[in-house]
């Protein structure tokens, strides 16, 4: 049995039918929903992380084959392994992981897969490089690439760099997808945790045209009286 076969076998040993049914519903896999057609076998994230520790030495080729699976938990396992390979890799290895990541975005096709990996691979790689790839992703017709774009900036936010987040948020203000509204609002909230003034300057300029969900996520941690002012539209623009 190959390492890849062993990893798949161990993952299935952690699966339950009850969890499969719960996850299918939670990740909106029904007709017309954002996760339409995705398949779950019923493995929770802590168990997937344990399997990833055992099989962290899968080759890149094996890991990408795992990422190409039609089973959600196998793709998640692959991304956990890829983030670890990136973290421990040499410059050349990190470049290879980053390039493989961006060339396989069609398999990073649910919000948990994006949120677990984008900041740790794309965000980390572009930290000291041109951020132009993030803007290309922000203009993608693919929902998940747009989410990768904004979530990748979480790595920069944690370093006190907010410019990319604000520029991409501005690009996505009129996005029609709720999962983008949530992601942008979340990242704006993270900016505000570190510098309320920067977040509020952005909000005062844009809050009246922002999708309601985006605004609610962005102001979630504000004092209640200030939240209500934003929600009622009584904050004066800059």
Image (spheres, rainbow, N blue to C red):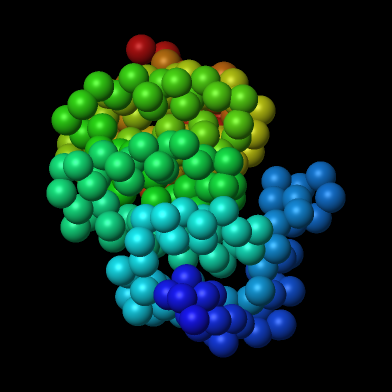
Residue 74 % position (x, y) = 54, 65
- Is any part of residue 218 visible from this angle? no
- Is any part of residue 71 visible from this angle? yes
How many discs mark residues in the rendered view? 0
Locate residue 37: give its quadrant: bottom right
Residue in the foreground of this view, choosing between 149 and 87? 87
Residue in the foreground of this view, choosing between 73 and 9? 9
Residue displayed at 61% across by 25% down: 141
User: Seen in the image, is 16 located left or right of residue 113?
Assistant: right
User: Seen in the image, is 81 located left or right of residue 5?
Assistant: left
Residue 168 % position (x, y) = 41, 24
Residue displayed at 46% across by 65% down: 77
Residue displayed at 52% across by 75% down: 5
Indicate whether 96 appears above or below 57: above
Residue 50 % position (x, y) = 39, 79
Residue in the foreground of this view, choosing between 183 and 48? 48
Indicate whether 134 appears above or below 62: above
Residue displayed at 34% across by 20% down: 132
Residue 188 % position (x, y) = 38, 35
Residue in the foreground of this view, choosing between 198 and 86? 86
Q: Quick one: quadrant of the C terminus?
A: top left
């Amino acid at each position: 049995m190959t390492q890849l076969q062993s990893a798949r076998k161990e993952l299935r040993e952690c699966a339950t039918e009850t969890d499969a049914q719960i996850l299918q519903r939670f990740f909106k896999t029904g007709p017309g929903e954002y996760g339409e057609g995705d398949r779950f076998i019923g493995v929770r994230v802590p168990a997937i992380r344990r399997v990833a520790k055992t099989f962290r030495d899968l080759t890149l080729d094996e890991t990408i084959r795992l990422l190409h699976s039609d089973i959600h938990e196998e793709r998640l396992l692959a991304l956990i392994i890829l983030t670890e390979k990136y973290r421990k890799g040499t410059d050349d290895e990190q470049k290879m992981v980053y390039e493989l990541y961006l060339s396989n975005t069609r398999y990073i096709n649910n919000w948990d897969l994006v949120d677990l990996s984008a900041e740790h691979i794309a965000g980390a790689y572009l930290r000291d490089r041109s951020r132009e790839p993030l803007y290309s992703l922000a203009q993608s017709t693919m929902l998940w690439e747009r989410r990768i774009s904004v979530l990748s900036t979480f790595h920069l936010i944690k370093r006190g760099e907010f410019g990319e987040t604000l520029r991409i948020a501005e690009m996505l203000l009129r996005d029609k997808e709720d999962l983008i509204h949530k992601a942008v609002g979340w990242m704006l909230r993270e900016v505000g945790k570190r510098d309320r003034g920067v977040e509020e300057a952005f909000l005062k300029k844009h809050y009246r045209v922002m999708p309601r969900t985006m605004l609610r996520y962005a102001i979630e941690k504000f004092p209640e009286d200030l939240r209500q002012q934003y929600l009622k539209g009584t904050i004066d623009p800059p």
